[in-house]
Amino acid sequence: MKTAPAREPVDASALRELRAIVGADHVRHADGDVTAYARDATPLFHARPDAVVHPASTEEVAAVLRLAGARSIPVVPRGAGSNLCSGTVPLAGGIVLVLTRLDRILEVSGDELLAVCQPGVTCAALADAAAARGLLYAPDPGSRSVATIGGTVATCAGGLRGLKYGVTRNYVLGTETVLATGEVIRTGGRLWKDVAGYDLTRLLTGSEGTLGVITEVTLALLPAPAAGGNGLAYFPGLADAGRAVAAIIAAGIVPATLEFLDAKCVEAVERFAGLGLRRDAGALLIFGDDGEPAAVARQLDRMAELCLAAGAIEATVAGRAAESEALLAARRCTLPALSRLGSITILEDAGVPRPQIPAMVGHIDAIAERYDLTIATFGHAGDGNLHPTCVVDAGDDEAVERAHLAFAEIFRTAMRLGGTITGEHGVGAAKLPYLAERLGTAQVDLLRRIKAAFDPAGVLNPGKVGS
Amino acid sequence: MKTAPAREPVDASALRELRAIVGADHVRHADGDVTAYARDATPLFHARPDAVVHPASTEEVAAVLRLAGARSIPVVPRGAGSNLCSGTVPLAGGIVLVLTRLDRILEVSGDELLAVCQPGVTCAALADAAAARGLLYAPDPGSRSVATIGGTVATCAGGLRGLKYGVTRNYVLGTETVLATGEVIRTGGRLWKDVAGYDLTRLLTGSEGTLGVITEVTLALLPAPAAGGNGLAYFPGLADAGRAVAAIIAAGIVPATLEFLDAKCVEAVERFAGLGLRRDAGALLIFGDDGEPAAVARQLDRMAELCLAAGAIEATVAGRAAESEALLAARRCTLPALSRLGSITILEDAGVPRPQIPAMVGHIDAIAERYDLTIATFGHAGDGNLHPTCVVDAGDDEAVERAHLAFAEIFRTAMRLGGTITGEHGVGAAKLPYLAERLGTAQVDLLRRIKAAFDPAGVLNPGKVGS
């Protein structure tokens, strides 16, 4: 069973109906208004939507979906558009349904350790609201300042704290979701333990807008740790950094942060931000932890020692909070730093088992050399999620083509090492060509049957996972 | 769409084929051999299977499912049969597929913090294998000494550490699963971060044998905490204990253990085990934590102080490991202690938001009185998962009927308070009558379509969730 996806355009009568649902101000179809929604943060993918619709309520979302279903118009839900796998590019045209007007935080409860919010709230805003109550919203994707809760739930976003804190799915307790038919369901609820029915909450998390439109989310919070800190170690090469990571894990430490940058990333960051990083090392490891102040200080010192024992050239623990934040800023600015090296930055997202990271980066470097490309790699050493990043020039079609071939080899290498084609960005259209290789055809067929069970008319985000 | 469930009996030719697949010794159909598989640990539900089949490999499971699909024979996967919602009772007859011969632990990796095992391994055996490597398998359902990994994954089992450590779903990284068609898929893998495709790993977790037969599981482990300890506090009533729980959470403590027993449970445990518990209190709270020794000692002292400040009659921290274990033993023997009070013990599994626990137990007591029943309540104060337990005599049909009516009211009350009909036991046939009330008919219809997407012939566990 494969859904025949919706493909009808938004005609004048559909526009009239859409205006009646959300108000004329919130339906746009002029070129100048919709071209910004032809792309998300994924390079090379774009497709013009017929209309961009900004609903303000669950009821409006449901009415738009009923209309779209009746007229076989594709609907692509979208938050901030910071997606990195073309998940929100409207490949089949139709409606881009922008959920940023649904931007209210409905509840932050210290008693119940949870928050309830609408999908258009940014991760940072939710984290700030939690922090104001002494609470932590743990998921912290790189795009947290702009990315919306709805988008990060739809992609099951990861971040810098994956090993210790898990990913978005670990924090989604419940959703309100509008099905493609316009029916509104509530999945899960406010409880940590609830096994009434199949786990639709987790199935929707990471479904990339193909199974339903999430209009409300209940998220688990944690008490904010009393203290946190970071340190940094330089190594001759990634193999040495890999030994340090193994030693940290073997010592029973599950650090909040364990990020690495290869030499190319360090060089780019230093040129971009002038943070005073050493340029003579082969790899940089940023380690950090949070918790009780004394325990954090002890863990940081211990991690620095383990790095030195594994062959670090230098290992230091940030003395004050500002220094500690500066270290994470170095990691967070890796992407903007790399993107200055060319006009197109292809940020990828493979994953391998933690012990395979040095081997994987070695393979990436060899592949880059073979295809005559600049590919720098940074990522999450704690959970094996790597971001090989290729920088090319927009005019150089031949280099873009080589980049595609190189990434195909990178994904295959990751799978061969027991890993995956996407750790935290999603499938979108960008990874769809590799999905059958990752999951097998029997499983991909099953995904299509699940998609059809949710969205028999193929209205939601056609051309993506489940298609 | 609703699956027309398989209903054909296992006839002589099917028996011949089954023997050819798994060997004659591993197919049983005589009364004496199959009656034990007519029930699980749920009282009042039973149905005789036509045959009991014990496969030894994934290939044998797949062959049995192909045969069953071709002949429209129901198949009910089963581990230890410790299920408490009749999830493994073969309501439509057919084959009970017992997975206990698939009992190998295939890998325990300290480097990758994971284990790979077959479904027939018990929770306790896996936890022991992990502990031998200095690692922790966190889920610890009450039945852990007999319950199998396959069964606890299929039910998304909880346990005593839910608030701090989450439930089974938080630890399942990947599965090998045989679909109803006999196709074998591998979901997820070895990574914490992997978003390639819909989250079938979590969808299968908690699917109660209705979507596939899990034949291998990859589970996340944690470094074993260096120390752990427990304490105990007696309160005049549950409202006081509830205030203590709120104060503990407000203090930023997320304890590993936070279990309560009402006065009826304390009385039963004391009569059963003679542990020296006080019988003059209205509620008992067992609190515990694990981690670095100094931090654990500090948290335990703090929790004892918070209990006293909230009105505890007495609060003590166990001095030594043996005493600490004895406290948990008191909690773990609550069910056997209660079950001595009558010949049928109906152990239920409602959930409410944590702040609603005292109100919920008040409602349970009022309902028990109204229906002239003995219902004692214990449970997980940290995550709001309550086990109201009704003890009746097998011969007293009228009391059994009153118990059903009382539990229906209890479930409705839990839902009214923002809770659920099952926190950790599952839906099975026991909770199926309440599922539409919990989820709404649109969602129940969607569960049926998902079931049909996995199992179009309705072979797997008919009459349960998704039916």
Image (cartoon, coloured by chain):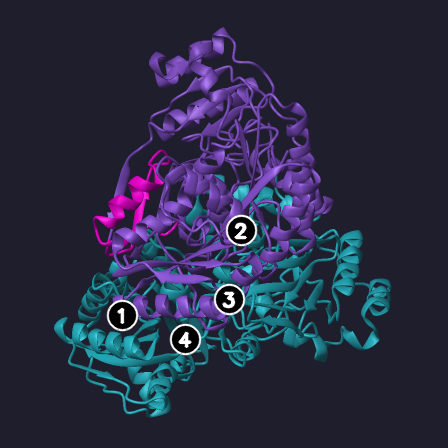
Chain colours: A purple, B cyan
What type is the residue that disc 3 sits on? Gly
Residue A256 higher or lower than B240, as above or below: above
Left or right side of A394 for B252: left
Judge whether residue A120 is colored magenta. Answer: yes
Between A107 and A39, the one lying in front of the other is A39
What type is the residue that disc 4 sits on? Pro
Q: Which residues are magenta?
A: A110-139
Say whether disc 1 or disc 3 marks the residue closer to the N-terminus.
Answer: 1
Query: Badge 2 is on which residue?
Result: A385
Query: Badge 4 is on which residue?
Result: B225
Alpha-carbon span between mark 1 and mark 3: 26 Å
Query: Badge 3 is on which residue?
Result: A311
Mark 3 or 4, closer to the camera: 3
What type is the residue that disc 2 sits on? Asn
Query: Badge 1 is on which residue?
Result: A294
Tell me, yes or no, whether the two marked residues, 3 and 2, touch with CB atoms within 8 Å.
Answer: no
Do the residues at pointers 3 and 4 share their chain? no
Say whether disc 1 or disc 2 marks the residue closer to the N-terminus.
Answer: 1
Quadrant of res B239: bottom left
Residue furthest top in the image:
A12
Residue A330 higher or lower than B140, as above or below: above
Residue B83 x, y percent position in the rendering: 53, 69
Say whether disc 3 or disc 2 marks the residue closer to the N-terminus.
Answer: 3
What type is the residue that disc 1 sits on? Ala
